[in-house]
Image: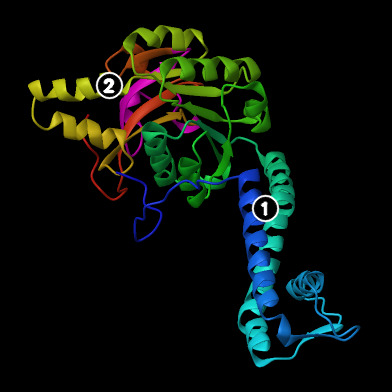
Amino acid sequence: MPIVTGETITLRRRPRVRGWAAIVWRALLLISLLVLMIGVHWLEREGLRDELDGHVSFLDVVYFTMISATTTGYGDIVPVSNNTRLFDALVVTPIRVLFLLIFIGSAYMFVARRSWEKFLMRRIQRGLEGHTILAGFGTKNRRALEELIKLGADTSDIVVIDSDEERLDIAKELGCNVMRADAARDETLRAVHVERARLMLISAGRDDTSILICLTARHLAPDVLISIAINEQDNEAPARRAGADIVVNPLNFAGLLLATSHGGQHIADYLGDLASIGGKVQLIERPVRPEEVGKPLRDVADAVGLRLIRDGIAYGFWRPQAAKLEAGDVIMEIKPTDPNAPLPTA
């Protein structure tokens, strides 16, 4: 399901002119308007009066045009004919306003906005603690963000790193912190304080790029939980050697879902429910509670216990280890999305 940021979906295009090219185009526009005004004033020079010598030269026309465009107006050269006054009122005045807008817009683009963005970035960086980093914002991480939001994650605690401005715009509209940068570079991950992050989701589109990002992140943050999406099964082992805690192969998972049709037509639907917060049931992983210590896994409250993880080893509900929960165990259980619904069967 695609992310919807409003009631309507609109087509957007990346700006064709950026940076100094935009300044050049604005300068050309200003020069063109000045040339237009000088030309008209020269043709209508009979409608101007020079209070100093009574003669209006080409230099006087240039001078009058410049002070008119900049709203200075010393009063030494003034329009006296109706045509010239009409031109100044209906053409020069709007151009004068346009000049101001162009100057203010340029100053904002190259000075104020960059200074403000740097200030905001430093402020955001100081508050990053226990956050989630999404390296790459293609289809997989976009879907992951949807699920995080449904699970109640605060988007202000999520940082999205991508090189595509349009993708970042989507994340920004959802309230995420965004950075247009290369997530495989040390300075990028240092800037988002990967060492203080709780979770990092990596899906860069290419397996080699994702693995390189994983290596960089693990080098800078030995303790952060890293989940990586890869496309080729042969790259699962390199991804784990790069430091990934969780390796997901969407193609393999899709194949498994398709294969479940052999066992029955409803199995794939049930697995889909488990995988999504929008399903009727949820697959939950949590630490054992103090009041559950000593009890069997089958007696967990308000859920169906499936598996426990003890010292990094998984034990199914049928194993003898599941007969008595211990402090430090991690439980995997199924519980209904609606707390008033009856418990599902395992």
Q: Going 34% across and 30% down the picture, which residue do you hit? A: 333
Label 2, residues with CA under 10 Å away: few <14, some 14-19, many ≥20: few
| Displayed quadrant of residue 38 | bottom right
Residue 264, position in %: x, y?
A: 8, 26
**What is the number of the mark on residue 205?**
none
Which residue is found at the position 51% from the left and 41% from the top?
165
Q: Is residue 223 above or below residue 76?
A: above
Q: Quick check: can you spot residue 345?
A: no
**Side of 203 relative to 259 (left or right):** right
**Residue hosting label 2:** 251
Q: Is residue 251 above or below residue 131?
A: above
Residue 247: x and y in percent read 41, 18
71 to 209, vertically: above or below = below
Residue that mark 1 sits on: 109
Three-letter amino acid code at disc 1? Answer: Met
SS for callout 2: helix
- Is 169 left or right of 258, judged from the image as shown? right
Magenta region, residue range: 290-312
In the image, 40 versus 169, the foreground residue is 40
